[in-house]
Amino acid sequence: MARKKMILDLDTGIDDALAIAYALASEEVDLIGITSIYGNVITTAAGQNSLKILELLGRTDIPVYLGLSHSSTTDQFAVMQVSKDIHGVNGIGEVNLPQPQRTVEATAAVDFMIASARQYGDDLIIVPTGPMTNLAAALAQAPELTALVGNVTFMGGALTVPGNVTEVGEANINQDPAAADQVLRSQLSLTMVGLDVTLRTLLTKQETQLWRDLGTKSSIAFADIVDYYIDAYAALNPQLHGCALHDPLAVGVAIDPSLVQTIGLNMKVETDAPFAARTVGDVERLNVPTTNVQVAVNVDVPTYLKRFMHRLTALFAQH
C-alpha cells in the first residue's frame, strides 16, 4: 500500500481511460476513487465509462462518484461536436465494453473530495483532467482544503502555445473558466500540465499494435479505443503524427514531477471575451514572493513514453 493517495477527476474519454490505466499501473500511489465531471461526455456517462474501464482492468474495488453536471456559470451542458469527433459519441472510441457490475456511489463527488482531504491531508493528490467545476465547488464548501491537499496536478491550459478550442483557450479550462480561475487564484499547491507539454507526448499505432499483440481482453480493447483516437488526430491534427497523451501525462507528472521542467507563477484565468479561458500570470500578484502554480513548459519525452508503455503494457498483459 502506497503512502500517497490519488483521486482522478475525469470526464472519461479516451485519454482519461489511459490516465486510469497509468494510475493503476503505478506502485507509487493508491488510486482511492474517481470523481466524474462533464466534458468529453456528460457526467453520468463519464461515471459509467470509468466503471467500465476499472472493470476491464480488474479493479472493481475502486469507487466512482458523480460530480456536477454543468459549469458554475450555466444551468446545462451539451457535449461539443469536436469532443464527439475525437473521443466518439460514447467517449471511448465507440468501443462497446460490458455494462459494469458496480454502480456509482451514493456520495457526491465533492463530498468525497472533501472527506478524502480531511482523511489523507498532505498525502492526497488530486488530478483533474476535465473542467475544474468539482474542485472549485469543494473549495467553496471547505476552504480549508487549500491547506490540507498535498498537490493538485491538472491537465488544462496553455501558456506558451495557442489553445485548442480558441486561440487562447484550452478545452478543459474553456468549459468553466470561472471555476478554473477560482482554483488558480486559491492557495492550493498546483501543477499545470497544459498543451505546452502534452502535445509533445505522442502515441502511434506502432505502440497500440504492441498491445494488440498481447492478445488479452484489456490490451485489445485499449488498442481499439486508442486507434480511434489516433485516427481522429490524423484527421484533425495531422501535423502531430500521433495522438497526444494529455491526461496520462498529468498522472505521470503528479507521481514524478521531475518528468517536466516548470516555472513558478501566480496565475489567473480570463473569464471574459475575447480572451476567455486564457491561463496567464496574474499581474496583481506578480511581485508576491511565493507562487502556488508550477507550470510545465518542457517534458522529458523519451523517459515518459518509455515509462508509459512499460507500465501500461505490463498492466494489460495481466487482464
Image: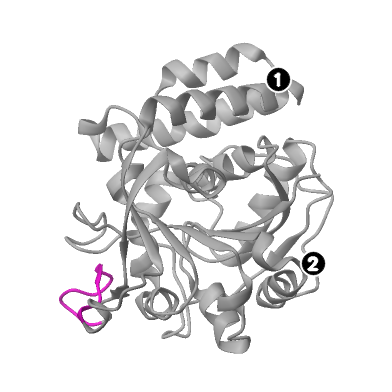
Residue 301 in the magenta stretch? The answer is no
- For the residues labelled 1 and 2, the Cα–Cα distance comes to 29 Å
Q: Is residue 273 left or right of residue 119?
A: left
Q: Which mark is residue 289?
A: none
Name the residue: 23% across, 82% down: 272
Q: Are marks 1 and 2 in contact (CB under 8 Å)?
A: no
Answer whether residue 279 is magenta in the image: yes
- Image quarter in which the C terminus is found: top right
Q: Position of residue 132 (x, y in %)?
A: 48, 70
Q: What's under tag 2, amino acid-wise? A: Glu
Query: Residue 235, image x and y in percent?
Result: 27, 35
The magenta region covers: 272-283
- Dot 1 lies on which element? helix
Residue 301 appears in which quarter of the rendering? top left
Q: Is residue 177 above or below residue 233?
A: below
Query: Which mark is drawn over residue 317?
Result: 1
Of helix, strand and loop, which one carries label 2? loop
Q: Nearer the viewer, mark 1 or mark 2?
A: 1
Query: Does residue 43 appear left or right of residue 262 in this picture?
Result: right
Q: What residue sits 63% from the left and 86% below the top?
A: 142
Residue 37's spot in the image, x, y percent? 56, 66
Q: Amino acid at mark 1?
A: Ala
Residue 289 or 173: which is nearer the viewer?
289
Up/down of 188 relative to 199, above or below? below
